[in-house]
Amino acid sequence: MNNQNGITSFLLQHRESKPVSFHMPGHKGADIYRRFGYDQFLENMMDCDVTEIHGADNLFQAESIIKCAMEKYRELYEVRKSYLLVNGTSCGLIAAIMSSVKSEGRLIMARNCHKSIFNALTLGNISPIYAYPELIEEFGISGEILPEEIERLIKENPDAEAVIIPSPNYYGICSDIKSIGKIVHDAGKILIVDQAHGAHLKFFSRFLCDEKDTDNQWYSLPESAEECGADIVVNSIHKTLASFTQSAVMNVVTDKIDLNVLEDKLQLVESTSPSYLLMSSLDINADLLNSRGKDLIREWWSNVTSFYKEAKNINGLKIINTGINMDWTKINLDMSQCGIAGHKLEQLLMDKNIFTELVTGNIVMCMTGIGNVKQDFDRLLCALREISSQNNERQKKETSGADDHLAELAKAIPKQESLHALPKNKQCVSLEVSVGRICASSIIPYPPGIPLICPGEIITEEAVHYIEALRDSGEKVMGINEENQVVVGM
């Protein structure tokens, strides 16, 4: 094979190392497909890569097999209509926004939304009104969007046509969708929920409803947005369930949505050459949930709860617990008490062939999925015990606190309620001299892909310090070129 340093070579070498995946996608590899009889599909994927041939149906005018798959999701989520997405949750969110807010309209949106939602503002010529999430200062991460914040913004901006929030967020923290939904609907507006990280919540609610353990603090997960009053919910099926990366489902829940307008916008932003492999994986995922969902969800939950019970006995390990509105399938680890900052913990786990999803400050987030098995959790527990036993107080004094100031800096960044006019003329300047200039291109720590500074916002001194601290701690920040320059207005 003449691909020694290419993408293919990397993927094959990674597979051969037999890694443990605590990152997306949720299927965690081919084993879940083999386990339930989809060997033939795996063996013939190249030959199954077709286009809209006779009998293959059409994603944008589904009448047969694709319509059947859509109907499976409609029934699974108990909604008005479901759409298969092959450009990820991003295209569904953009279509949902552009169909709910007219050009030059206004959208109330969480400031910690994914960058795709900011892209929708540009594509739809829409102005944002920011709802700021609570800051969990102890850990330096974003918390929930409070209902009273949404209520305040609706009263102050009665012309806003819709509200969009992410729930759960990247760390698994959920907002009170039921209360927010009532506020939004009482005002006659549309509620869109970015449930990219919570496609599984509906099935935990369904399959674990009779298994609540009141002696265990990890006894339940929040309800899904579909159950709580959202009008449109977009789910990244691939993140936690069993479909391929980039596949997602958009659920229209209420009759407030004009399906013709939504479908028109969806065709603007989704590929005209949809992958049948992606759609097939969505179909397989639906069949797994219908035929094996109860067993798979209970197995997943049993592994997660067993992990938490064992992990609480590991010296120096802190599990992030922000309250009852948590998706506990996201395991947030903090070993700063052992003197281990987030990126060091990530590396120590990688040294043991365990790969995680996200690092923020001292937190390493392990994203579990429907494809994880008990052995995965056992290996993670074993690794954490070894890491704990190998670190002492002397190391703590030397290494802890490398990221402690990030939360304070994040808190110090001024909230910007409105945007300046987007600059027509742009230039690149060094980050150090950008203070006071109007940002012309988003600056985004990635992951999680939430813009720190958006086009039209003023670059503040606090923000520059924060960016520098992020990069010093090993975070990757998009929007800054190799010469340490950012794009600003002239």
Image (cartoon, helix red, strand yellow):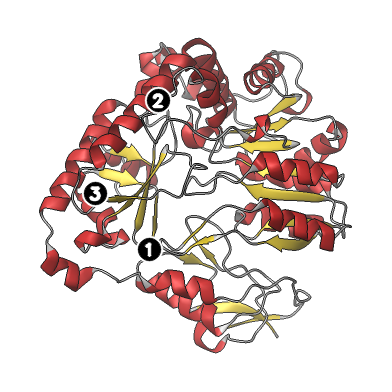
Q: Which residue is mark 2?
A: 213
Q: Nearer the viewer, residue 223 or 123?
A: 223
- Quick one: label 1 or label 2, which is nearer the N terminus? 2
Q: Residue furthest front?
A: 215
- Please state, as top left, top right, bottom left or bottom right, where the C terminus lies in the image: bottom right
* Dot 3: element: helix
Among the 4 quarters of the image, the one containing residue 139: bottom left
Q: Amino acid at mark 3?
A: Leu
What residue is shown at x 68% (from left), y 51% (from top)? 147
Q: Nearer the viewer, residue 73 or 134?
A: 134
Q: Which residue is mark 3?
A: 349
Q: Position of residue 400 (x, y in %)?
A: 25, 68
Whether residue 471 is visible to the viewer of this picture, yes or no, is yes
Indicate which disc residue 41 carries. none
- Along the horizontal axis of the image, is 385 left or right of 156? left
Whether residue 268 is visible to the viewer of this picture, yes or no, is no
- Please state, as top left, top right, bottom left or bottom right, where the N terminus lies in the image: top left
Q: CA distance from mark 1 to mark 3?
A: 16 Å
Q: Amino acid at mark 1?
A: Gly
In the rendered image of this protein, does residue 69 appear above or below residue 165?
above
Q: CA distance from mark 1 to mark 2?
A: 33 Å
Q: Position of residue 24 (x, y in %)?
A: 43, 40
- Quick one: label 1 or label 3, which is nearer the N terminus? 3
* Dot 1: element: loop
Q: Amino acid at mark 2?
A: Asp
Q: Position of residue 199 (x, y in %)?
A: 56, 33
- Quick one: label 3 or label 2, which is nearer the N terminus? 2
